[in-house]
Amino acid sequence: MIKIGILGMSTGNAHPYSWSAIINGQFDAAEISRVGYPAVAAYLQANQDTLGLPNACVTCVWTQEQEVSKSIAKTTGIKNIVQTAEEMIGQVDAVILSRDDPENHVAMAKSFIDANIPIFIDKPLAADQADLDYFSQENAKGKLIMSCSSMRYSVEARNTKIEFPALGKLELITATGKKDWIKYGVHLLEGVFMLLDDAKPITVKHIGESGKDIVHITFEGGLQVIVNLFMEISGTFQISIFGQQGWRLIEIKNSYAMFRDNIIEFVRSVEQGKSRLDFFKTENIIRTLIAAKESLQQGGKTIRLYH
């Protein structure tokens, strides 16, 4: 049985609740709704029969607020609430850093990486090059560091990928979603990169504005991708794929399935002693994410990732 620690809680991110419930196989729908996540309670209730992983258990939790830790523990059956994050070292086999504020990821992950404890870091891994370089260097030392958006495991996207041969040569992909570029643009990038078997991005150009992010990416071979993130629109995450012989629209709605598959892949990675998601794939996505931010800051300058 792999003992997992849940580390951290950030505003608006319900992953400490939902992921702990998926692993431990229990949840309190009323409490999850009370703290502001009724949609999470709903999808956990709809999938009760598939909750719980036979070979893993969340045994420890730490957040920056004791009351939040108590709520997560009570809701999902976590036995140990630690007073500091570092108390988990020696008590767990792996940790999930379930905060989506990348500026804090290095500081919160470092003690576990130094202790050679496998870690999954919630998306996005980093939002600047210095932090990305740190994780790249630690990965190169053989540390088990896994990070991605669960969009990589989207059922809807993977089902559509099967149909690619009928589309002919791909010419254009557009992807659209709501909210900010750093925390939510990474979802769409992850989905697009997975669909393209993690093709190499060559150039990135931000052609929108803050809050209305429009990012143009050119991939090796000439494929054009446009990613749109708007704060004030409605709708699901959508990816449209246009080939010379056909096209498909993907609406990504099944959060539960992709979260569960993501967690399973991390547990399998811990069992095998090596991340099943090659770090270079995450690195390419984060480099693209950062390049778009830099392009916007530089007035829409084209950023070349590879020469």
Image: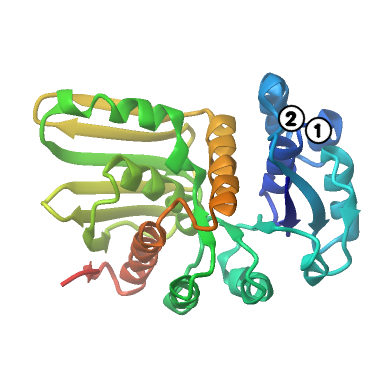
Query: 278 and 285: which one is in front?
Result: 278
Q: Which mark is residue 298?
A: none
Please state the horizontal and vertical placement of residue 193, each as a whole percent of the image: 32, 48
Q: Coloured how? A: rainbow
Please state the horizontal and vertical placement of residue 196, each as a whole percent of the image: 26, 44
Q: Which mark is residue 27?
A: 1
Please state the horizontal and vertical placement of residue 251, each as a whole percent of the image: 41, 28
Q: Left of 268 or right of it: where is 298? A: left
Say what secondary structure mark 1 lies in. loop
Say what secondary structure mark 2 lies in. helix
Report the quarter where the C terminus lies. bottom left
Q: Left of 173 or right of it: where is 50? A: right
Amino acid residing under circle 1:
Phe
Residue ID at (58%, 40%)? 264
Q: In which quarter of the image is residue 37?
A: top right
Q: In which quarter of the image is residue 217?
A: bottom left
- Whether tag 2 and tag 1 are in contact, CB under 8 A, the answer is yes
Q: How far apart are the alpha carbons under marks 2 and 1?
A: 8 Å
Q: In this view, does 23 lie above or below 293?
A: above
Amino acid residing under circle 2:
Ala
Residue ID at (85%, 53%)? 68
Report the quarter where the N terminus lies. top right
- Of mark 2 and mark 1, the one earlier in the sequence is 1
Please state the horizontal and vertical placement of residue 271, each as a whole percent of the image: 59, 50
Residue ID at (74%, 43%)? 17
Q: Residue 41 carries which label?
A: 2
